[in-house]
Amino acid sequence: MRLDLSRFLSSDIERYDFEGELALNDTNLDIDDLRIIFPIKYNGSIYDLTGELVLELNISYDFIANCDRCLVEFKNHREANYKAYNFKDSSFYDEDSIDEYFEVVNDSIDLSEIIISLVVTSLPGKNLCKEDCKGLCPVCGKNLNEGECDCEVEEETEVEEKVDPRFEKLLDLFKDEEV
């Protein structure tokens, strides 16, 4: 999906606001495994700073994930922000000073590519169905969010007895020391 900037670029307007929904992935990026729920909502602004452009973009989307602790499938909501620049003079493109650039081709911007890339980079590394998810019992595999299991909880002393003797010294690593 391309955002047409021809009227904005040919006028004296300093700010152009836009919003909409990306109904499907029309890029070459393969995101089928991410289980994104379309449409992806977006809004943003483009500022003209005497010929140099600044793009600010906000997206909001939902996706299906499995909890990393209890494996339950759930719907998750995510929002992300993006800021990028377009300079007429290519000498301003310095990797150390500015993180993101965008291209204007035929007086338009390819928003689909930017939005899908932002979705991919904004997905969490860890998905939890709820903040205090208890996970699964390591012995029987029961979802502890649904109630306690009948397994006996091992005492810490029993755990220390099962430690491989080669790693025994590691148990005392931080005892009685200032960290």
Image: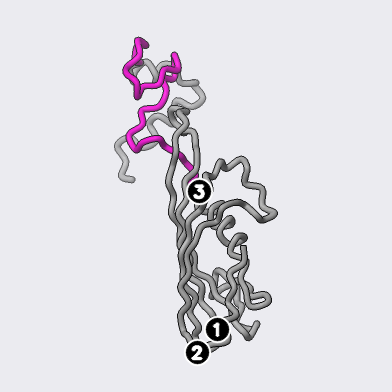
Name the foreground residue: 31 vs 39: 39
Disc 3 element: loop
Name the foreground residue: 98 vs 113: 113
User: Mark 1 to mark 3: distance in Å?
Assistant: 30 Å
Which three-letter amino acid code belongs to the residue tagged 1?
Answer: Glu
Q: Does residue 91 lie above or below 24 as drawn? A: below
Disc 2 element: loop
Residue drawn where x is 61% and y is 78% of the image: 93
Disc 1 or 2, which lies upstream in sequence? Answer: 2
The magenta stretch is: 124-153
Name the foreground residue: 163 vs 115: 115
Expressed as whole percent of the image width and height from the top left, the position of residue 168 reads 45, 25
Which three-letter amino acid code belongs to the residue tagged 2?
Answer: Asp
Q: Residue 123 carries which label?
A: 3
Disc 1 element: strand
Expressed as whole percent of the image width and height from the top left, the position of residue 178 reads 31, 44
User: Mark 1 to mark 2: distance in Å?
Assistant: 13 Å
